[in-house]
């Protein structure tokens, strides 16, 4: 898409430092004749809004994580394993990967090599000409340099001198690419008057924009007096697509910023009805705004947000948690007191001593989960078939012939847990120790484990078979479905041992509610071996006894939150809580 300016002599004026636009009051818009041609649709992807370089963020987090959890180099030290955080604790995966791979990359990748240095101050025409001559790349120089400038957050004035040069050189023609990337820089640097100038040009000459252009204009306008026009742009956007959660966030923040609470809540409702998951920033904005509002209607809506977090297993970030605390403490006459706390193994809050909701599934939840696992994961469509119907039937009959199990062991996975220990020996160690406690054990394995080899010794496997029920599947079968079936079929008391986190199975479950039940069940039933040294007693990490979810008893709230500097994987839960108590 190209912007034509027939009266090109006016164009350089547009991009001079004064920000005065020919389209402004007192000027006739006829002095600019802009024509747009070429399709709009192809332009969707060519810019993206980046606020930070992802590599740098990663490198930063890594360094911070490293300083929090100094890596133990001595792998023979017994403390290593026992110091590992809980399998499901935020940051645990990160820490495991650091313990296991000493060569973890510590530095961000070097930036893509530039053939030329980006200017740091506005250039005149001669200087731009010179720079273009020096450019050795194959790409179009103008497009390349504006992309680099957008990426490196160059100043608006430098970009403006580029556009003026391009306009002067091309009879007033400026590519839409350049214009939108310029807009990106204006929005980034919060140059609102400049945003409005570009908005005027676009509004005058384009019937519709592509989504990127709309999004930038919305973001740029919400902080100006003309913020309501951002809502009109949102309406335009809705004609062709569902706006993004970010578009809604911008409009809601704009409405709150200008004290229009009704518009903000209406947009929030619309966002939810589009099945979008709101950005946490949006929710936080409602709490931040709420501390100056004293009405029950507003308070109830904020409570609804907390229930939304609960129902969707979402956790606020650290600053959002602070906003929630501040809002509760600001409610007049209610005397809420907030503190940051942790939960003890027993499930008791370190702040108030109350017991957090149990992780254990109710009989109804357990039955519902069991039914869904059986139908979605085990019997499921071909896509998820991990075994043959004959083998599954054989396994079902085998399970029926045994008493309910207390612990189901993924034999192959447990055997391979520590590379320096022979598989069959470690499996036997685990099984013998558990058998001493008079537990009904099931070891799931593959047929190849019964063939004598250096890793699987026949005598040791024979002993395993004497101490536990064993089922050996075909080597090509996946043992996870068997593990899930046997554990769930044995009842709510039965636990299982595997290092595997079974994320694939969670993904197979068709609805979010069942996925959550599965995750809850997994946290409460998966045993993890924490001791990795042969000869010594094997120790297990206790499964969590409490459910990490936003919860209330009416006069108390407990809200798990993510710390800013801890990277949490999707299958981990936060370890920090906001404890809120009402003094009565
Ligand atoms: Zn508490």
Image (cartoon, grey):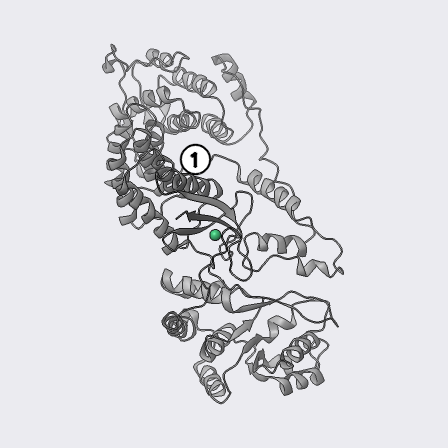
Indicate yes or no: mark 1 CB to ligand 1 under 8 Å. Answer: no
Tell me: 267 left or right of 443. Answer: left
- The quadrant of the rendering that contains the N terminus is top left
Tell me: 96 left or right of 459. Answer: left
Tell me: 458 left or right of 154. Answer: right
Residue at image mark 1: 49
User: In this picture, is 170 found above or below 80?
Assistant: above
Q: Residue furthest front?
A: 584
Q: Nearer the viewer, residue 436 or 8?
A: 436
Residue 504 position in % (x across, y down)? 47, 64
Q: How many marks?
A: 1
Q: Residue furthest bottom?
A: 401
Residue 274 position in % (x across, y down)? 28, 48
Q: Nearer the viewer, residue 247 or 446?
A: 247
Res 208 seen here: no
What SS does tag 1 mark?
A: loop
Q: Quadrant of residue 288?
A: top left
User: In this picture, is 396 found above or below 287?
Assistant: below
**Badge 1: residue crowd in 10 Å (few <14, some 14–19, many ≥20):** some
User: In this picture, is 214 found above or below 563?
Assistant: above
Res 2 seen here: yes
Q: Nearer the viewer, residue 142 or 244?
A: 244
Residue 451 position in % (x across, y down)? 66, 82
What residue appears at the point 37 percent right and 22 percent down from the top-left corner? 192
Q: Quadrant of residue 33?
A: top left
Residue 70 position in % (x across, y down)? 69, 48
Q: Nearer the viewer, residue 201 or 3?
A: 201
Q: Quadrant of residue 362?
A: bottom left
């Amino acid at each position: 898409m190209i912007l034509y300016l027939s009266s090109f002599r006016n164009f350089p004026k547009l991009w001079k430092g004064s920000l005065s636009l020919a389209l402004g009051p007192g000027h006739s818009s006829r002095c600019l004749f802009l024509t747009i041609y070429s399709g709009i649709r192809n332009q969707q992807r060519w810019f993206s809004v980046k606020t930070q370089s992802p590599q740098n963020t990663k490198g930063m987090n890594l360094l911070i994580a490293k300083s929090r959890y100094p890596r133990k180099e001595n792998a023979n030290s017994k403390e290593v394993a026992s110091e590992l955080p809980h399998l499901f604790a935020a940051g645990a995966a990160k820490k495991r990967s650091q313990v296991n791979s000493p060569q973890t990359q510590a530095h961000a990748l070097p930036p893509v090599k530039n053939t030329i240095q980006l200017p740091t101050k506005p250039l005149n025409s001669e200087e731009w000409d010179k720079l273009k001559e020096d450019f050795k790349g194959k790409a179009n120089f103008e497009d390349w340099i504006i992309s680099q400038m957008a990426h490196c957050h160059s100043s608006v004035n430098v970009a403006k001198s580029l556009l003026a040069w391009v306009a002067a050189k091309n009879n007033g023609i400026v590519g839409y690419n350049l214009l939108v990337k310029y807009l990106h820089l204006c929005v980034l640097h919060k140059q609102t008057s400049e945003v409005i100038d570009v908005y005027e040009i676009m509004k005058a000459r384009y019937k519709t924009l592509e989504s990127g252009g709309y999004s930038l204009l919305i973001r740029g306008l919400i902080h100006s007096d003309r913020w309501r026009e951002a809502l009109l742009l949102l309406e335009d956007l809705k004609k062709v697509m569902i706006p993004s959660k970010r578009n809604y966030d911008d409009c809601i923040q704009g409405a709150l910023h200008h004290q229009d609470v009704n518009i903000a809540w209406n947009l929030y409702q619309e966002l939810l009805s589009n099945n979008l998951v709101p950005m946490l920033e949006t929710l936080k904005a409602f709490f931040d705004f709420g501390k100056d509002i004293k009405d029950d209607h507003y308070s109830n809506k904020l409570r609804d947000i907390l229930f939304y977090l609960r129902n969707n297993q979402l956790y606020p970030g650290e600053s959002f948690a602070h906003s929630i605390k501040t809002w509760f403490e600001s409610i007049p006459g209610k005397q809420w007191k907030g503190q940051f706390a942790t939960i003890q193994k027993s499930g008791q809050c370190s702040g108030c001593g109350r017991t957090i909701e149990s992780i254990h599934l109710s009989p109804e939840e357990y039955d519902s989960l069991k039914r869904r696992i059986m139908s979605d994961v085990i019997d499921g469509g071909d896509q998820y078939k991990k075994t043959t119907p004959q083998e599954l039937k054989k396994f079902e009959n085998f399970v029926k012939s045994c008493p309910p199990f207390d612990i189901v062991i993924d034999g192959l996975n447990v055997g391979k847990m520590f590379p320096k220990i022979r598989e069959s020996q470690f499996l036997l160690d685990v099984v013998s120790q558990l058998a001493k406690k008079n537990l009904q054990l099931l070891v799931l394995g593959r047929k190849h484990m019964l063939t004598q080899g250096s890793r699987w010794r026949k005598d040791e496997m024979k002993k395993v078979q004497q101490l536990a029920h064993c089922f050996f599947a075909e080597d090509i079968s996946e043992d996870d479905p068997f593990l899930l079936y046997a554990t769930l079929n044995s009842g709510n008391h039965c636990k299982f041992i595997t290092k595997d986190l079974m994320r694939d199975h969670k993904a197979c479950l068709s609805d979010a509610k069942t996925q959550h039940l599965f995750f809850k069940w997994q946290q409460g039933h998966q045993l993890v071996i924490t001791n990795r040294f042969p000869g010594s007693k094997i120790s297990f990490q206790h499964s969590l006894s409490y459910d990490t979810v936003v919860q209330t008893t009416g006069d108390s709230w407990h809200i798990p939150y993510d710390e800013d500097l801890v990277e949490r994987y999707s299958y981990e839960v936060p370890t920090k809580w906001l404890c809120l108590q009402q003094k009565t």
